[in-house]
Image (cartoon, rainbow, N blue to C red):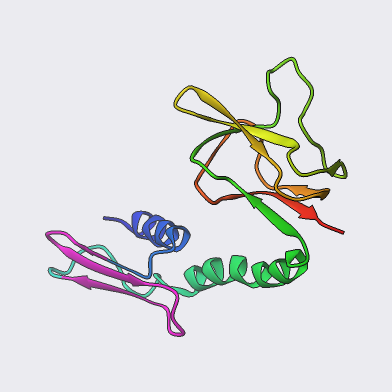
Amino acid sequence: MDIKEIQNLIKFVAKSGASEVKLEMDDIKITIRTGSESDTTIVHQVPATQIPVAPIAAQPVATEVAVPVAPAVPAADEDSKYITIKSPIIGTFYRKPAPDKPLFVEVGQSIGEGDVLCVIEAMKLFNEIESEVSGKIVKILVDDASPVEFDQPLFLVDPS
């Protein structure tokens, strides 16, 4: 295993969100820890081979993990005044009833209770998702033709 492979492994672990990964092979043992105050990467060599320990630092891992976390907190406070409409099922989210038809709703549009907001295809069935609140669409959180999970936020609605 060369330095580039180890660096790629560190980047992969940082992006995956795992807190600790241990890799043991015949001639090398690697432990990568992220998410703590003292992020570390430890490389142990059984026989002395061509892999140096010094160039591998966990500092880039710490910055990659920490950067996305900081902006997420203010966004939650900003969106707290809005009602979130969530997916009631797993499936594929569509903003139109058919490719040649207009969108159900757009940002800025006023909606009422019972208005169809989108359809979610699940097992070849198209389920219309109706609004349970009245208000104005502030944000559409999912791209057209994207897979969605149960309870995943789809729309932000301003009830005022």
Question: As drawn, which residue projects farthest toward the top?
Answer: 100
Instruction: Specify start and end residues of the magenta stretch as a single range.
Output: 22-45
Quarter of image, res 126: top right
Residue placed at 72% from the left, 37% from the top? 117
Residue 107 point in image, percent of width and height? 83, 43
The magenta stretch spans residue 3: no
Quarter of image, res 114: top right
Relative depth, front residue between 54 and 122: 122
Relative depth, front residue between 31 and 74: 74
Residue 155 point in image, percent of width and height? 70, 48
Side of 140 relative to 9 (left or right): right
Residue placed at 44% from the left, 26% from the top? 123
Question: As drawn, which residue projects farthest toward the front?
Answer: 114
112 is higher (above) or lower (below) than 96: below
Side of 25 relative to 105 (left or right): left
The magenta stretch spans residue 26: yes
Residue placed at 48% from the left, 68% from the top? 61
> Which quadrant does the N terminus fall into?
bottom left
Relative depth, front residue between 91 and 110: 110
7 is higher (above) or lower (below) than 52: above
Quarter of image, res 71: bottom right
Q: Main secondary structure of the magenta part?
A: strand
Residue 18 point in image, percent of width and height? 38, 65
> Which quadrant does the C terminus fall into?
bottom right
89 is higher (above) or lower (below) than 138: above
Question: As drawn, which residue projects farthest toward the bottom?
Answer: 37
Residue 43 point in image, percent of width and height? 27, 71
